Amino acid sequence: MIDSIVTWRGHRWLGLGARLYLGWVFVAACLHKIAHPAVFALDTATYDVLPLSLVNPVAIMLPWVELFAGVMLIGGLRVRAAAMMTSGMMVMFIVALVLALHAGLDMSCGCFASQAMDEDPIGTTTVLRDLSWLALGVYIMLFDREAIGLEQTLSPQTREPDAVT
């Protein structure tokens, strides 16, 4: 029974929807951070989970990793690796959110753009939202084994053998 759940052909289509959505989330989240690294560095420092010496390198590199993983998910390239990257980032983000909430910080999430506190506050709903994105990443890792996308299109294994006449 478990094998039939894991190998169900419908995962290809559910996985495609999950990948397109999660990839879009990561691409959308990184654009402001790439365009405004100083603002993102301030958002990162506000969480108070990194040593100050790591804030700037993380603020510069993390958005590019988000972009790379998001594009891989959308394009269907190395899907399981991209899902593992996004899931790892989601775990990291969730831990930072929970620590900030536990510390009583009253701040903006800074997830998509640095916004006013009343527009994007951290809270339980932010954690639940991130947990749902983590669940999508885990779903893709576990069940989207025959991902529809560029990798499948370019793979020699998916091409039909030449007909022998």
Image (cartoon, rainbow, N blue to C red):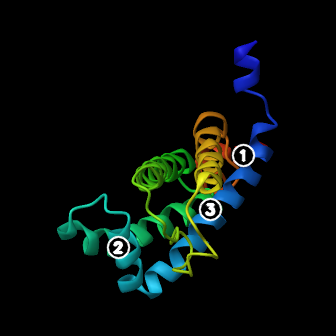
- Which mark sits nearer the N-terminus, 3 or 1? 1
On screen, residue 114 above or below 71: below
Residue at mark 2 to residue at mark 3: CA–CA distance: 20 Å
Residue pointed to by mark 1? 15
- Local crowd size for mark 1, using a 10 Å CA cut-off: few (<14), some (14–19), many (≥20): many
Residue in view at x 44 percent, y 81 percent: 34
Q: Of tags 2 and 3, which is closer to the observer?
A: 2
- Local crowd size for mark 2, using a 10 Å CA cut-off: few (<14), some (14–19), many (≥20): many
Residue pointed to by mark 2? 59
On screen, residue 70 above or below 30: above
On screen, residue 101 above or below 157: below
Residue pointed to by mark 3? 23
Q: Position of residue 72 (x, y in %)?
A: 55, 61
Amino acid carrying mark 1 in the image = Gly
Q: Position of residue 151 (x, y in %)?
A: 60, 54
Amino acid carrying mark 3 in the image = Gly
- Which mark sits nearer the N-terminus, 1 or 2? 1
Q: Quadrant of the C terminus?
A: top right
Mark 3: secondary structure: helix
Q: Quadrant of the N terminus?
A: top right
Residue 75 visible in the current orientation: no
